[in-house]
Amino acid sequence: MTENAVEIRNLVRTFRDGAVTALDGVSFDVPKGQVFGLLGPNGSGKTTIVRILSTILAPTGGSATVAGFDVVKNPDAVRRSIGLAGQYATVDQNLTGFENIYMIGRLNHLPKDVVRQRANELLAQFNLSDAGNRNVKTYSGGMRRRLDLAAALVAHPPILFLDEPTTGLDPQSRQDLWFAIESLVESGVTVLLTTQYLEEADRLAKQLVVLDKGKIIAEGTAAQLKAQLGTTVLSLTFQNLADADSALSLVRDLSDKPLNHDGTVVELTVNSGPATAAEALRRIDASGVTLAGLALREPSLDDVFLNLTGHKAEDAPAAEPVAKGRKAKR
Ligand SMILES: Nc1ncnc2c1ncn2[C@@H]1O[C@H](COP(=O)(O)OP(=O)(O)OP(=O)(O)O)[C@@H](O)[C@H]1O
Ligand SMILES: [Mg+2]
């Protein structure tokens, strides 16, 4: 196996005879033994990359290797090296949790007694032992996601692709899955994770690539991405939408970065926080608008994303409205 778990060079994928460009020349390396984050809004190309890397879809151009094997020339070797938990849990609803894992293990040509033992181990690891003999139909969303991840691990793959593993989960289930992913990486597994949740990427990923419309628009560690932005976010809260709207025009020029306006909150990314806060206060006070709250905070990855793309990660227009309905908002 090479230094990197995954190497992608100038990857291109088009659909509909070239009418849709899902990937427009993407290159990156995923080093072994860490979580690598692929971040981007709806339709940016995350799932297309995961599908190419798991040999479900062929690239239109460029190349990709997984565990040192070319995805086009050596798909069988690639498949033996990976586990995949897709964007939507793919477990069979009419089987029990145990049966699902057992079936995947047998499809992976593992002997019956090995699979039986492995299934029980995995159910215990993901806190599903009690539910193991129940039909998946009766599972919650979080339980299905955990089972999907457990099934992906049945053959001990060294590389794991997780496509939006926590989308639609409640905060507790999300936390549980984060712990599970962290302990996998501690055991030496490499994880390529796609997400729209910047908080998730910040928490889990050592390195990140930010995709927008099939292109990489930024890469580095979360800290590097935040440092590009400036030092402080000035957050102003108003009592009602009308006040926030009028304040917007008063303070807009205090930052040359895109500002975040969400309901009664207006946020500016600035380099000199206290001085800008004082100036904003003077202007707002002079206009007669009442300020309900003011805070200075460090930039988050959400701010980075807004600054790079001009829109928030979750606000991006859906490219495929059909798929959108299945995705819960944060
Ligand atoms: N089979 C297909 N036929 C036509 N267009 C496709 C197909 N698969 C993907 N696309 C298009 O390619 C682009 C990238 O899609 P992709 O599913 O990779 O995005 P994504 O980042 O995973 O989005 P999401 O966050 O919604 O899952 C989108 O514009 C999508 O409409
Ligand atoms: Mg996707």
Image: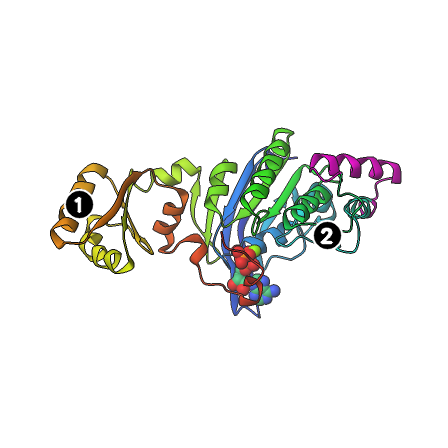
Q: Quadrant of residue 92?
A: bottom right
In the image, which disc is placed on residue 138?
A: 2
Specify the amino acid type for callout 2.
Thr
Other-residue count near label 2 (Cα within 10 Å), few / some / many at <14 / 14–19 / ≥20: few
Residue 273: horizontal and vertical position, in percent? Answer: 23, 38
Helix, strand or loop under label 2: helix
> Where on the picture, by quarter, is residue 78?
top right
**CB under 8 Å between discs 2 and 1:** no
Residue range (magenta): 106-129
Question: Is 292 left or right of 31, judged from the image as shown?
Answer: left
| Image coordinates for residue 96, horizontal then vertical, percent | 79, 49
Give the distance between the C-alpha atoms of the residues marked 2 and 1, in whole angstroms: 54 Å
* Residue 235 highlighted magenta (yes or no): no
Query: Between 90 and 155, which is closer to the camera in this rendering?
Result: 90
Could you say which is closer to the camera, residue 173 or residue 305?
A: 173
Q: Position of residue 208 (x, y in %)?
A: 48, 42
Q: What's the residue type where badge 1 is placed?
A: Leu
